[in-house]
């Protein structure tokens, strides 16, 4: 019996030893690489020059960690255009978190660093495609992106896994992208509105032009003129902040461009200018969104009186020859209120000229 037990024990030890030898010779699988990885949305439309993000990759159980990189990009004719997307451009990137207390130009600039980067990048761990201001240099069109997915199991080539649709957009947006212009008049020195000229999407009283003068520095210049192109003097106070309604309101004035970047604001005899630290700008939205409110003082303006304007009617106001023209309000009685939205999407130097078609500088 004892001999039998010894034999059983010895046999068990032999089986365990042989099993260990077999396992030690067997290659352990390092992971799984799915052949069915894809994007939930395999078309990424983005406006060039702005920060945009695509959907992330659906890895279909592919073992982590994995690395994803783009290998080639083709235009709609099938030509390899890797050089367009691999070229680097100077782009201001955030190096620290922007805090609510960071309100000055210097504080915001201290948290940015200009670096040479490609116009788009692919996050290697989740596949998200991110564009930056340098994408302004990518020609408008449709492109197709090949990628390579790698992990411990090997690598997989993903041909044309993403379609890139590069769209053009306005570097500086006003109406209708960010809202609408509004024109009102009020008794001189009072905030109560006497007459509203237009709140419709089709506002016939304001014509404006936006000119991007240079890539750097980040400067905004705004001029407000009468129908003849004569500018109102910000420095002299011909055009000022618009008073808020009510008795002793807090704040006393509605927001304007100066509120968004007060430490760089400069009033001139032909307009105003300021330096802005980053885009999109304004960086922090104020209670009235991106709207800016101004008041042209009664002693400096003659205002047309008009009949009701059909908001569905096309065209701009033509002054004395316009069928809506009813003469002018008595000089010195009414202030002119102007509201306009403004958002800068791409860094650069801009000049905005707003021409009010139903007023004359005096």
Image (cartoon, grey):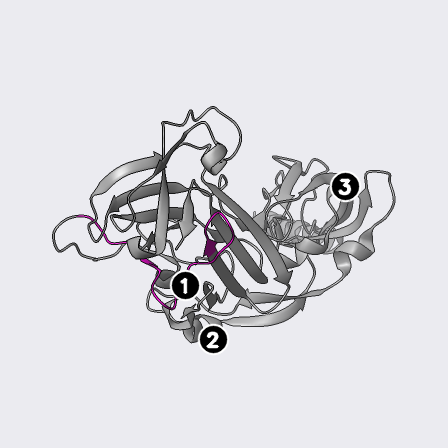
Direction from residue 352 to residue 299 in the image, left or right: left
Point 75% across, 55% down: residue: 85
Which residues lie in the magenta part?
Answer: 224-245
Q: Nearer the viewer, residue 128 or 97?
A: 97
The location of residue 235, given as percent across then percent down, is 38, 68
Mark 2 → mark 1, Cα distance in angstroms: 33 Å
The location of residue 210, given as percent across then percent down, is 57, 52
The residue identified by callout 1 is 233
Direction from residue 322 to residue 34 in the image, left or right: right
Badge 1: few (under 14), some or many (20 or more) residues near its Cα, within 10 Å? many
Point 56% across, 72% down: residue: 113
The location of residue 100, given as percent across then percent down, is 34, 64
The residue identified by callout 3 is 144
Q: Nearer the viewer, residue 136 or 313?
A: 313
Q: Secondary structure at mark 2?
A: loop
Q: Nearer the viewer, residue 309 or 121?
A: 309
Instruction: State whether residue 123 appears in this view.
Output: yes
The residue identified by callout 2 is 110
Q: Nearer the viewer, residue 26 or 331?
A: 331
């Amino acid at each position: 019996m004892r001999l039998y037990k010894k034999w059983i024990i010895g046999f068990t030890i032999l089986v365990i030893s042989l099993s260990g030898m077999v396992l030690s010779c067997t290659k352990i699988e390092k992971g799984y690489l799915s052949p069915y990885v894809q994007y939930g949305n395999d078309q990424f439309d983005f406006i060039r020059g702005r920060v945009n993000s695509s959907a992330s990759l659906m890895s279909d159980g592919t073992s982590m960690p994995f690395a994803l990189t783009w290998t080639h990009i083709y235009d709609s004719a099938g030509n390899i255009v890797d050089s367009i997307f691999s070229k680097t451009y100077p782009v201001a990137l955030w190096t620290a978190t922007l805090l609510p207390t960071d309100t000055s130009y210097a504080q915001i600039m201290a948290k940015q660093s200009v670096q040479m980067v490609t116009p788009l990048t692919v996050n290697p761990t989740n596949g998200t495609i991110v564009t930056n201001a340098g994408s302004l240099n990518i020609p408008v069109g449709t492109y197709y992106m090949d990628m390579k997915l790698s992990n411990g199991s090997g690598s997989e080539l993903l041909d044309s896994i993403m379609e890139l649709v590069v769209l053009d957009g306005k570097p500086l947006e006003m109406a209708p992208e960010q809202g609408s212009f509004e024109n009102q008049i009020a008794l001189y020195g009072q905030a109560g509105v006497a007459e509203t000229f237009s709140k419709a999407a089709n506002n016939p009283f304001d014509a404006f032009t936006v000119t991007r003068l240079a890539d750097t520095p980040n400067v905004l210049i705004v001029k407000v003129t009468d129908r003849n192109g004569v500018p109102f003097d910000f420095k002299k106070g011909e055009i000022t902040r618009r008073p808020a309604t009510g008795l002793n309101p807090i704040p006393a004035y509605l927001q304007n461009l100066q509120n968004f970047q007060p430490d760089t604001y400069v009033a001139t005899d032909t307009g105003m200018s300021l330096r802005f630290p980053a885009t999109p700008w304004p960086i922090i939205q104020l209670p009235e969104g991106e709207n800016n409110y101004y008041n042209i003082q009664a002693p400096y303006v003659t205002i047309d009186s008009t009949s009701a304007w059909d908001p569905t009617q096309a065209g701009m106001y033509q002054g004395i020859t316009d069928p809506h023209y009813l003469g002018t309000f008595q000089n010195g009685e009414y202030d002119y209120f102007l509201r306009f939205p403004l958002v800068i999407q791409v860094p650069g130097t801009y000049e905005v000229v707003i021409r009010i078609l139903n007023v004359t500088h005096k």
